[in-house]
Image (tube, rainbow, N blue to C red):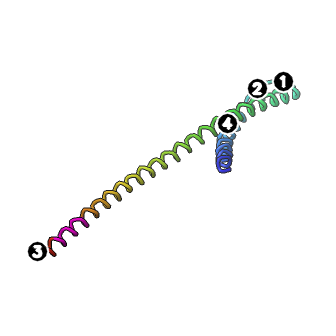
């Protein structure tokens, strides 16, 4: 469930980015093209329909690619943080084990000192 939610989030983020870019780009191109051509209204409408279909198809493809890229980047960041956390935990475990060993040796020395004090 979480994976699907994250996927939808990245698709949405990519869709917003691509849509904004495409709308600006296509709007400028279409206005320039329609203004310069001296075709009839029907030809202009057909031209605009075809252009919109092409743009939607390209945008859909780019949205999917961008969402995959964003998701991959996110997964890499998560992996990096998990790896860093794991290494820190291993370091802490090593330090704890070293401290336990030191405590054990100090206890042994303490027992030895007590036994030598009692026998003396």
Residue 108: in magenta span: yes
In the picture of the structure, the residue carrying the numbered disc 4 is 64
Residue sitting at 19 percent across and 67 percent down?
Answer: 112
In the picture of the structure, the residue carrying the numbered disc 2 is 36
Q: Earlier in the sequence, mark 4 or mark 3?
A: 4
Between the C-alphas of marks 2 and 4, the distance is 34 Å
Q: Which mark is residue 120?
A: 3
Residue sitting at 27 percent across and 61 percent down?
Answer: 102
Q: Earlier in the sequence, mark 1 or mark 3?
A: 1
Looking at the picture, how far across and down is residue 14, in whole percent?
A: 65, 41
Residue sitting at 74 percent across and 31 percent down?
Answer: 57
Residue sitting at 75 percent across and 29 percent down?
Answer: 54
User: Disc 2, disc 4: CB below 8 Å?
Assistant: no
Q: Nearer the viewer, mark 4 or mark 1?
A: 4
Decide which of 3, 9 is in the foreground and name it: 3
Between the C-alphas of marks 2 and 1, the distance is 9 Å
Q: Is 109 left, or right, of 19 in this rendering? A: left
User: Disc 3, disc 2: CB below 8 Å?
Assistant: no
Between the C-alphas of marks 1 and 3, the distance is 117 Å
Magenta-tinted stretch: 106-115
In the picture of the structure, the residue carrying the numbered disc 1 is 39
């Amino acid at each position: 469930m979480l994976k699907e939610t994250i996927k939808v989030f990245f698709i949405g983020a990519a869709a917003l980015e691509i849509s904004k870019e495409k709308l600006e780009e296509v709007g400028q191109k279409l206005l320039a093209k329609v203004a310069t051509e001296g075709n009839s209204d029907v030809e202009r409408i057909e031209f605009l329909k075809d252009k919109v279909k092409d743009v939607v198809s390209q945008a859909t493809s780019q949205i999917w690619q961008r969402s995959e890229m964003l998701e991959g980047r996110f997964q890499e960041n998560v992996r990096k943080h998990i790896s860093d956390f794991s290494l820190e935990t291993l370091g802490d475990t090593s330090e704890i084990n070293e401290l336990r060993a030191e405590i054990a040796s100090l206890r042994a020395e303490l027992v030895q000192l007590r036994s030598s004090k009692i026998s003396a």
